[in-house]
Every structure is written in structure tokens, then in C-alpha cells.
Amino acid sequence: MSRRILIIGAHPALYRSKFHQQILRVIGGLEGITYHDLYEEYPKFIINHEKEKKLLVSYDVIIFQHSLYWYSAPALLKEWMDVVLIYDDLNDGAQSLLRGKFWMSAISIGSPLEDFSRHGVHGYSLTEFMRPFEQTAKLCQMQWLPPFVGSGLKTATEIEMSQICEAYRRVLIGLRDELLHPEDLSGLTYINQDLAQLNI
Amino acid sequence: MSHFAIFSVLFTYLAAAVVMVPLTRYLGLGSVIGYLIAGVAIGPFGLKMSGDVNAIQHFSEFGVVLMMFLIGLELKPKKLWRLRGPILGMGGAQVFLSSLALALALRFLGVELKESVALGMMLALSSTAIVLQSLSEKGLLKRSSGQNCFSVLLFQDIIVIPMLIILPLLGNAQAEKALENDAGWIEHLSSFEHAGVVFGAVVAVILVGHYCVSPFLRLVTRAQMREIFIAAALLLVVGIAAFMEQVGLSAALGSFLAGVVLAESEFRHELEANIEPMKGLLLGVFFVSVGAGVDFNLLQEKPMVILMLVSGLILIKMLVLLAVGKLFKMPIQDLGLFGFALAQAGEFAFVIGKYAQQIDAISETNADLMILVVALSMLLTPALLWVHDRVISPYLSGNRDQITLPEEDISPEGKVIITGFGRFGQIVGRLLLANNVPLTILENDPQQIDLLRRWGQKVFYGDVTRADLLEAAGAADADLLVVAVEDMDTISTIVSIAREKFPNLKIMARARDRQHAYSLREKGVHYVIRETLGSAIDMGISCLKELGWGAYRAERAGQIFKGHDEESFNLLADLWGDEKSYGSALVSRRDDLKQILLADRHDKSLYQDTEWKSSQEAEAEIVEVENIETQEVVEGILDRITTKALGEN
């Protein structure tokens, strides 16, 4: 038994990000996971929504993987959401395209997590900044999972980056092989806040 | 020699080469060995058919002159500068230390001081021909291990010149004067004046080369005859070589200089392509003559001595190489190749040896001995490399615990070759250049080249439909070949040749129209684009904007159209494949256009931007599509339209 995972990745300048390249190598080494690179497929920003909808249908877990650009998604991912997630399509009674599928945001941020607090630089928690994604998932009738967060990347060493990659790998396997269930995750703020506890 | 004698000797030499060389190459031993063995086979110790070896050698020494010319030509000042560390450092150390060690060893064996030094210098040089060829066959030239060998060989090539200058000092002054009888007026000069004349000559060659040769060759190319160009090129080399000999320097130095001066000209690739085969052949004959001149009697008389000398030579050189490599912190795997590949003595020993003997720097006995020893060391090189590959290299790699990183692929310049630098090629080229992609540009319109060079753009002249020019331009190693010439048939020819000769080279081709594009696709082009597509779509987009459409809306419409057009292009390509065997061009073109317009009509909705519409709009659109007339009626209309349209063209 395994879940089919689709990772929708959006990075406008992959050639500049060692971390995201490393993440891609992690994904490449895993079976049963499809990576869909938006900036590669739609360099002219003309997204084919029929094609995207057909793609989404055949997966159980949709992971949106990106850096947090100004507390939000990179432009092309936002474009994707605007073009593909049409409210009417997704809420058309029993035919809703995405009903019941999992939405997990896997984001990378430069600052340390502590900055995302009332007294920190960003003034609000990360959870609050993720509300638009969370609410979008809900309106698409999807199950929102706690996000995977790779933080502190502005100053991370190679070892720290590798640790984040390794955690991501374990989470992906956990989701794929059904070692993780929504019930286990309900209390968590981030899916990778305490992997040991999750037995993956 | 009589007519017949000349022919029969030539026949013998060529026959020997033709038989031997493919054999040795097949066995992985390289061509130089083949030539040498061929020479031995036809020489006095074989079939005794070699005729007047000295005369042949004299004639084929011209091959050496051409070789030095090509070496100079292929020298890229930027590359030289980039490699100046390894070249001067490793190369200098290797030559100096080897000469020293060998000279000391010879002195120890009882050879006179001056002769020891002369012999030491000559034996320090390795065989450029064998090593470069073996490395290139093994694909190692691009890697750092190969590059180290290359740097040392390059230094050795350059140091030949000073060696030729130093040798007379080691020789017998009278013998030298005797040699220079032809040079006439030189003998009357003091050495100071002589140096001045030499300096003047070198400067003259540089100036003439830089300012006069290119315009001269440009004039020659106007004649549009390949053989005249070749003649002019040879004229150049011979002229400069002769001039240098008059002044008392060697022809080799002169031609080397000529090559260096022409390395930056637009004719470099064309010169390379034309002279390379001649050099190859003459050099081959030279090696055959060397093989024929090897004195096997000596081997019979003193086998142990010879054996000791050969192994001593290889051992000493190898030790020096390993020491130099270690000194320059070469990784251990590279050290193995470095030591084994360069341990032999090379063809320069034959060339310089002759000269040295004439000026009495070395005795005749020692010269003969040296030739034998050098030839044997050359013959042993493939065996040495085999030992390295099978025994040493795996041993060295196996010893490393961590994963070895792949060696840095040092690609020489020119990852992309563009043929044709006119209206289309220029834009592609400029885009790539602006993004630091190394380009080699080939053009055959002298006026275009002229114009471009005046603006500082590096362009090379040549008939781009010739495989040897493409090869000289680096097609074997390039990543992409962009075919951007204007003429349809030329495009197709280049594509055919490139697909045949360089099957791993990705081709990006400009197509004149759909039909041309289909045929190019069938030839296996990696990427083909109809030359007018992009501009026409941009025009269409601009039209929409002028008609009041929002910019983004117009842009999307254009991209959607382009995407759909590409799809139908791919679909129709297969159709074209079936129908191309019959029917007139007009009919098939008409059908083609008809198919396209029909498809457009039916799939109209696909052309339209369906995003961001409300559900009411979506419904209205479905109704509209259902109102389209039946296919036959549409076809009838289209028939009339297309006939009229094609008729008017």
C-alpha cells in the first residue's frame, strides 16, 4: 500500500541554489514520487490548465515545494494556483477534482524559525503566514498537512543543509509508505519538528 | 634518381605505410610505430627496397617543417598564457632535469662533456606524435592528466628552437661553417651582427605575417579555387622557412614562427584543414625513412649494451617525470600516466640529431646508436602505456578510499560551432556570446568576414560544407552545431555531413519552410526551427496589440497559437513522410496548407485563451463551436482558398 506523491516545485533560479539542487537529488533517489518543475515546464508562464488538472487527478499527495518569497509562493506557483485551481471546478459536488487529497507545503526560509514570532523580525508566526495556503487547500476540499519547513538557510552549513534534506527524505518516505497518518500529525506545527516522535 | 627509381621508391614507401599503419592502429599501437616498422621492413635489414634513405629523409623533413607550422598555428596565446604555469614550470623542470640526468649518465659512461650535453638535451624530449596520438585515442587529452602531458610536450616543442641555437655552441665551429657555405654572406658577419640579422629577420617575419598574409590570402580566396589556396599556404611556409635558413636559423623555427603569427587570422582553420593531411603524409614518410635508417647491425653486435641504454633512458626519464610531477603536486593517478607516457625519447632526436651530427656536436657512431635507442624506446611506448593501463592505473585507483571525483573536463574553447553568420546566425551568436558561451564561427563569404573582423568579432573562413573544416573547427568535441546558413541545400548538405561524420554532435538547424523542416527532422536534426516562425508570431502579437488588445492578452494568444502550431507541425510531419514519395510539390504543398487551415478551423477553441473566464462565458463558447459547418462544406471553401493563394505565389 502506498500513496502516490506529486511534488510541484517552483524555483525561478535553480542554478543558484545549492540547497534546492540537493533536495532534487534526494527526490531523484526515491521511487514512486513524481517531480513537476513549473519553471521548467512553463518558462513563458502560459500554464495549460487542462494538462495540470489531468496530472493532479492521479496523485494522492500534492506537495508544493518552494522558497517563501515575500511570505508567499514564487510568482509562477501563484500563477499556477490562479489558473488551475478554479473554485467551480473543484467544488462541483462529488466530482471535485481534489477532494480528499493531501496538501503539504514544503517551504524553505532564510531566517531562523525564531524570527517568525510576535517579537521576532517578521512579527507573526509562520503558521499565520501559511494561512492563505491552508485556506486554499480547505476550499479545494483537500486535507491540509502541517508544512515541512527548512529554516535558517541563509546561514546554514553544508551539514545543516544535509540534515534538512535527510529529514525531507524521511518525511517523503513516511507519506509514501503510509507510515504517517493525519491523526499522528494533527497537533504539529511543522511536520518535521520532531521526527523521532513520528517513528519514521 | 631516374624517373622509374623515384616512382618505385615512392611506391615502396607508400605501400609499406599503407600495409603497416592500419595494422598497428588496429592493434592499438598508434601510427608512428607503424611507420617505423614499415621503414624497418623495407630497409636494408628487411626487404632492402628503401633506396637512397638519406635523400628520402631530406625530402620528407619538409614534413617536420609543416608539423612545426601546425604546432605554431594551433598555439593559442590565451591558452598558452593560461597554461603558463604547467608549461614553463613542469615542462621546464622536466626538460632541464632530464637533460641534466641523462648528460650525467652519459658522462659516467665515458662520453665527452659537450657530446653528453647535446645528447642529453635531445633525449630529454619525448615523442609529441606518439604521445598526443595515444592520449587522444584514449580520450585523455581533455582531462587534467592529459593536459599535464600536453603542457610538457608543448614546452618541449618550443624549447627545440633554443636547442637548435645552443647546439652550434656544442659543435665544431669549422663543421658549422662548412654547413653554412650556402648561406654565403652570413659567414662574413661577426656573431654580434649575426644576432642582429637574426633578430631583424624574426621581426620581419612577424610583421609580414601580421599585416600582409591575411590580405594576401583574402585575395587568393577570391579565386575560389581550393588548390590555389593550398598552394598559397605552402608558398607561405616554404618561403618563410627558406628565408630563415638564409639567415642561419632552422627552417623549423621559421615555420613555427609563421604558424604562431597566423594563429589569430581568420584562415587558421582553413590552413589547418589543408595542411594537416600533407604534414601527416610527409611525416609518415619521414618516419619510414627513419625506420629504414635504423642500424640493426648495432643491435646484433651489442645487444646487451643497447638493452641497457634503452632501459636506462626510459628509467631515468620516468624517474625525473615522477619527481617533477610530485614536485608540482600532481594527484597520484595522474602521476602514473605522466611518467609512463612521456618516458620515451622522440622524433625530435632524429631531426636534431641529424643537424647535430652535421655540425659535429655528436659523433657518427653515437648518432647511429642514439637513433637505434630512440627508435626502440618509441616502439616500446605502446607496451609501456599498456602496462600503465592494465597494471599501474587500477592499482593506484584501488588505493583510494574516498570516492574519486570525476576529473575536471577542461574543454578547449568552442563548445558551439555556428556555420553561417548572416542575418540569422548573428542573432543566435550574439545571444550566446552575451551569455559567455564560447563560439567558433564559420563563414565563407570573405566580405562578411571582413566586416565582422573589423568590428572585432572572431570569425573563421572556410567552405562550411566540408567535413575536414568542421573537424578542424572542433566538431568532434563540440556540444552543438548551429546551422544558420541561408541556402536550403547548403543547410541540408551540412546536416547530412555532420550526421554522418559526427553522430554525437547535436544539430540545431534553420529551416526555410515546413517542407524543409520535415526533411531535416528526418535526417536526425536535434532541433529545427522555421526561420520565419518567431518573427511572424511576434508581428501577429503586435497586430493584436495595435487593434486594442491588452499586451498580456495578446502575448498569451501568440504563445498559445505557437504551441498549437508546433503540435500540428509534428503531426503533419508524419503525414509528409508518407506522401513524399509521390505527387508534385505543388499538390503536397496545397494539401499541407489545406490540412492546416482545416485543423485551425476545427480547433479554434484551442487557440483561444480559456483561462480566467466565468462559467457563463464558458457555456457560451461551447454553443459557438457547435455551430460550425460540416467538414465537406469547409473543405470545399478551403480548396478554393488554397488554390487561389498558391496560384498567386
Image (cartoon, coloured by chain):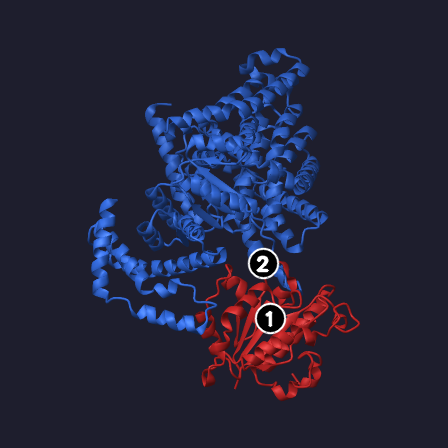
Chain colours: A red, B blue
Q: Does B327 sit left or right of B454 as displayed?
A: right
Tell me if residue B198 can be seen.
yes
Instruction: Identify the disc placed on residue A194.
Output: none
User: Which element carries disc 1, helix, strand or loop?
Assistant: strand
Give B376 or B407, whichever is nearer the viewer.
Answer: B407
- The disc numbered 1 marks a residue on which chain? A
Q: Where residue B57 sits in the image (x, y, percent)?
A: 47, 29
Instruction: Identify the disc placed on residue A65.
Output: 1
Q: Is residue A21 above or below residue B302?
A: below
Give B544 or A95, whichever is nearer the viewer.
Answer: B544
- The disc numbered 2 marks a residue on which chain? B
The 10 Å Cα crowd at callout 1, few under 14, some 14 to 19, many 20 or more, is many
Q: Quadrant of the N terminus of chain B?
A: top left
In this view, the residue farthest toward the bottom is A183
Q: Does B602 sit left or right of A159 as displayed?
A: left
The 10 Å Cα crowd at callout 2, few under 14, some 14 to 19, many 20 or more, is few
Q: Where residue B85 sits in the image (x, y, percent)?
A: 68, 42
Q: Does B149 sit left or right of A188 as displayed?
A: left
Give B414 or B238, whichever is nearer the viewer.
Answer: B414
Q: Does B304 sit left or right of B607 as displayed?
A: right
How much space separates mark 2 and mark 1, taking CA atoms? 49 Å
Q: Is residue B388 above or below residue B608?
A: above
Q: Residue at x 56, y 50 (%)?
A: B384
Q: Where residue B318 sits in the image (x, y, percent)?
A: 64, 47
Tell me if residue B34 can be seen.
no
Instruction: Identify the disc placed on residue B391.
Output: 2
Q: Quadrant of the C terminus of chain B?
A: top left
